[in-house]
Image (tube, grey):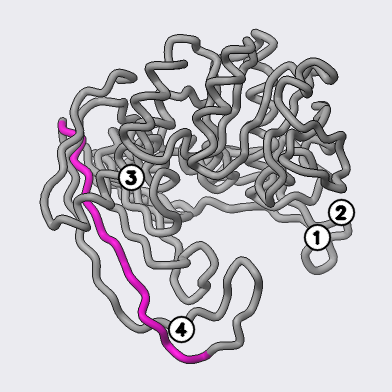
């Protein structure tokens, strides 16, 4: 069985060893800074972990500033790495990290959004050519590098230059939910919305729209729109031109078990478009959320890559490009000017 170790002990690190228990993948321990009562063995250093547990790869889930040095240490020990997003905190850090380990081919980035069932089904619909050539992606649901990953993935955009424009506005908004639960605060507070356009050239563009705490605030819809040459996908619906003088609208339908008199238990089964299955849950019976399914899929894909049985799931070059563009969005919004990203060493 392929094994891995986690560096870190926060809420994100915890998800990796918990989910690994539900798939044929062994978490042999966690590298932590001090004594912790964890459900996996703990080690004081990566060196100790490698010596005593000999993991096949390592997952690095630590604060942004600490990540690059640990990635470099793992690569120097010959260990494949799955690094949480982003792989480095800023542009200079991304370039330094690439100079140190980019040529090793040992580093993957834990970008899981395109593996979530809904997004995976949408990506399958787009890649099938249903709406022709994808030309624009609009994302309003998640922030920074995650949103950029969705935009680039749905467009099939590579790692070349892009021009970014952005602006911010602030308006009152009630914020009833955070990661910690209900706030029970019904008074509107100032919330900032960042809107950006990304021009990749060749008629391909992205629209980024994110409001503070939009991940948790259910008073803002999540939206994803993919425009193509022969139609478009809007959230869970496709409009297209399959034949002359024939415009068709078709829904993406998720089969979710456990509702009403369905006694199979709460679970995601499939997502279909008409008679075609776009997505099938590879972990039936686990009762996992979309986020958990995506992380399990990423862990499985990383393990297969480490064994030489699959291609790299999300190379460092792609994770670096996502964060580079996310930083360009912030810079463009801060300075009120167009920011153009050039050809980076990982492109």
Q: Are marks 3 and 4 in contact (CB under 8 Å)?
A: no
Picture quadrant of residue 13: top right
Q: Answer few, some or many: residues within 10 Å of disc 2's Cα (few below 14, many 20 plus, some between 14 and 19).
A: few
Q: Which mark is residue 258?
A: 1
Q: Which mark is residue 326?
A: 3
Instruction: Answer with mark 1 or mark 3, whichever residue precedes in sequence.
Output: 1
Picture quadrant of residue 312: top right
Q: Magenta includes 255?
A: no
Q: Answer few, some or many: residues within 10 Å of disc 3's Cα (few below 14, many 20 plus, some between 14 and 19).
A: many
Q: Nearer the viewer, residue 319 or 206?
A: 319
Q: Which mark is residue 174?
A: 4
Predominant secondary structure, magenta span: strand
Q: Nearer the viewer, residue 294 or 230?
A: 294
Q: Are marks 1 and 3 in contact (CB under 8 Å)?
A: no
Q: Are marks 2 and 1 in contact (CB under 8 Å)?
A: yes
Give the percent coordinates (x, y) of residue 319.
Answer: 43, 31
As drawn, 276 above or below 183: above
Q: Which mark is residue 264?
A: 2
Of labels 3 and 2, the one closer to you: 3
Spatial CA span between label 1 and label 3: 39 Å
Q: Which residues are magenta?
A: 186-201
Q: Residue at x 60, y 41 (%)?
A: 62
Instruction: Answer with mark 3 or mark 2, whichever residue precedes in sequence.
Output: 2
Of labels 4 and 1, the one closer to you: 4
Spatial CA span between label 2 and label 1: 6 Å
Q: Secondary structure at mark 1?
A: loop
Of labels 2 and 4, the one closer to you: 4
Q: Quadrant of the C terminus?
A: top left
Spatial CA span between label 2 and label 4: 38 Å
Instruction: Answer with mark 4 or mark 1, whichever residue precedes in sequence.
Output: 4
Give the percent coordinates (x, y) of residue 33.
Answer: 72, 40
């Amino acid at each position: 069985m392929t094994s891995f170790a986690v560096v870190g002990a926060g809420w994100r690190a915890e998800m990796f060893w918990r989910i690994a228990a539900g798939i044929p993948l062994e978490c042999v321990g966690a590298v932590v800074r001090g004594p912790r009562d964890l459900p996996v063995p703990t080690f004081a250093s990566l060196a100790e972990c490698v010596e005593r547990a000999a993991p096949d790869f390592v997952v690095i889930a630590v604060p942004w500033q600490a990540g690059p040095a640990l990635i470099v240490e793992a690569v120097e020990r010959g260990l494949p790495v799955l690094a949480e997003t982003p792989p480095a905190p800023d542009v200079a850090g991304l370039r330094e990290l690439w100079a140190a380990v980019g040529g090793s081919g040992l580093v993957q980035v834990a970008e899981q959004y395109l593996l979530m069932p809904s997004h995976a089904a949408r990506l399958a619909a787009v890649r099938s050519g249903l709406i022709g050539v994808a030309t624009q992606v609009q994302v309003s649901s998640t922030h920074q590098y995650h949103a950029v990953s969705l935009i680039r993935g749905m467009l099939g955009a590579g790692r070349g230059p892009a021009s970014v424009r952005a602006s911010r506005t602030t308006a009152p908004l009630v914020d009833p939910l955070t990661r910690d639960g209900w706030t029970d605060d019904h008074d509107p507070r100032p919330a900032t919305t960042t809107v950006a356009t990304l021009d990749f050239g060749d008629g391909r563009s992205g629209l980024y729209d994110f409001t503070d705490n939009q991940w948790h605030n259910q008073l803002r819809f999540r939206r994803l729109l993919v425009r193509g040459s022969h139609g478009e996908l809007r959230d869970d619906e496709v409009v297209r031109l399959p034949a002359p003088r024939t415009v068709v609208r078709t829904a993406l339908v998720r089969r979710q078990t456990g509702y009403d008199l369905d006694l199979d238990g709460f679970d995601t089964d499939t997502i279909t478009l008409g008679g075609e299955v776009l997505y099938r849950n590879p972990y039936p019976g686990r009762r996992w959320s979309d986020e958990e399914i995506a992380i399990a899929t990423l862990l499985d894909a990383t393990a297969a890559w480490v064994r030489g049985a699959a291609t790299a799931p999300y190379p460092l070059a792609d994770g670096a490009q996502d964060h580079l563009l996310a930083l360009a969005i912030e810079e463009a919004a801060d300075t009120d000017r167009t920011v153009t990203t050039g050809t980076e060493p990982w492109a």
